Image: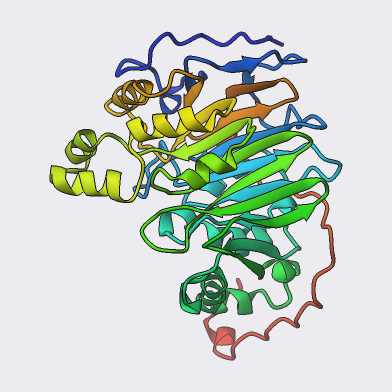
Amino acid sequence: MLMYAWHMTAEINEMTELACEGSSQPLTTTPVVGTPGREYPSALEPGVEPVFTGEVRVTILGSGDPFVKKSQASASVLIEVGNEQRDVFFFDLGSGALANFTGLHLPVTDTTKVFLTHLHADHVGDMPTLLWSLAKAGRRDPVEVWGPAGEVRPLGTRAFTQHLEAAHAWDMESLCGHPGQSGAMTVTTEVPYDRTAVVYQRNDVTISSFPVIHVLNGAVGYRLDYAGRSVVFSGDTRPCHNVVDACDGVDLLIHETFPTAPVLAKKAGMPLNLAELIVNGAHTSPAMAGKVFERAGAGMSAIFHLAVDHETVGPVFAEMRTQHDGPVVISQDLTVFDVAADAVIVRQRILDPMAWAVVGETKESGPPMSAPHGPPRWWADALITD
């Protein structure tokens, strides 16, 4: 086991090797903040290193933007808590995130708590997989979903989950008689979109939501507190005071950051004025992310929601550095942060690409199982039996 044996990256530029190319190093010049009280391997193997009591582990399941690619799933953050219950929380669940989750060898039975920042598709795309596929894979408990209310009911999270279940009515009906039926449903709690509120308090974990500025009313960020450790996740937002205010004494801030407008225009093949509108009118530029990091004063800050490639990481890191010189990480898929008593440690997790679902303990009994449907009559003549 190695103690703080990470390569100290002196510079992040177009030559930096990325995780999708095989690098096991996080994209940062500061992989450790503080003085860890124990040894941490330089990379985190699947199923090998449980979360220690009193610590919080944050894994970027999806680091990318709306354009899903093999190298990056869309937006999702996993938080594991070292309490007695070993609670697991999803914050957003973009497309591809659950493939990364399965490769970590974590129990599928723990996938019962989701906090959505807003209802853009790149933040909720894996919700059908969570609800129906993972119920078939072994989860028997329903999924609790927290997310913002809307200015009108059809724009709120409860309407989203109700319509999601309606859209998957055939799948739900097909589960009659299947033990996963009890896990293929949601219990939804809407959180305020216009004020800060404590929205979750269980098992020594407190989660608060706060409003952020993103396209419409109905986008929020979250702060998780446990055992003196704290993490803030901005969701999608323009630079705003609410994020900074939520970061009082925080250990880790994960903040969305888009590429510079010229890089976005070139990479996406769009006019520069449209790229500027996207970066500055709905998201946060690298320089403004640096200003937020400087004001927030987190122990460690992380750039998130960035299309990571050789043409983006250098300009983004350099522009951020014009405003902030503290510890900053560019998040990639499977970047992991261990938030301990006296330190924050960043590494990369190693994925098992062929993992099967790990089934743990079911925590509560669901509703009675419905009787299975009998086969349609025409199957008898159509079925090949020998």
In the depicted structure, whether residue 374 falls above or below residue 38:
below
How many numbered circles are shown? 0
**Res 185 → quadrant:** bottom right
Give the camera-side residue of 359 and 336.
336
Q: Image check: 356 left or right of 255?
A: right
Q: How is the image coloured?
A: rainbow
Q: Image check: 98 left or right of 218?
A: right
Give the camera-side residue of 70 and 308.
308
Residue 93 visible in the shown view: yes
In the depicted structure, whether residue 170 falls above or below residue 56:
below
Q: Position of residue 381 (x, y in %)?
A: 55, 86
Name the image quarter holding the N terminus.
Answer: top right
Q: Residue furthest bottom?
A: 377
Q: Position of residue 27 (x, y in %)?
A: 46, 22
Q: Residue at image x 44%, y 45%?
A: 240
In the depicted structure, whether residue 375 falls above or below residue 93:
below
Q: Residue at image x 62%, y 45%?
A: 223
Name the image quarter holding the C terminus.
Answer: bottom right
Residue 100 visible in the shown view: no
Q: Position of residue 214 (x, y in %)?
A: 39, 55
Q: Position of residue 219 (x, y in %)?
A: 47, 58
Q: Residue at image x 60%, y 16%?
A: 32
Q: Residue at image x 13%, y 46%?
A: 271
**Res 122 → quadrant:** bottom left
**Res 50 → quadrant:** top right
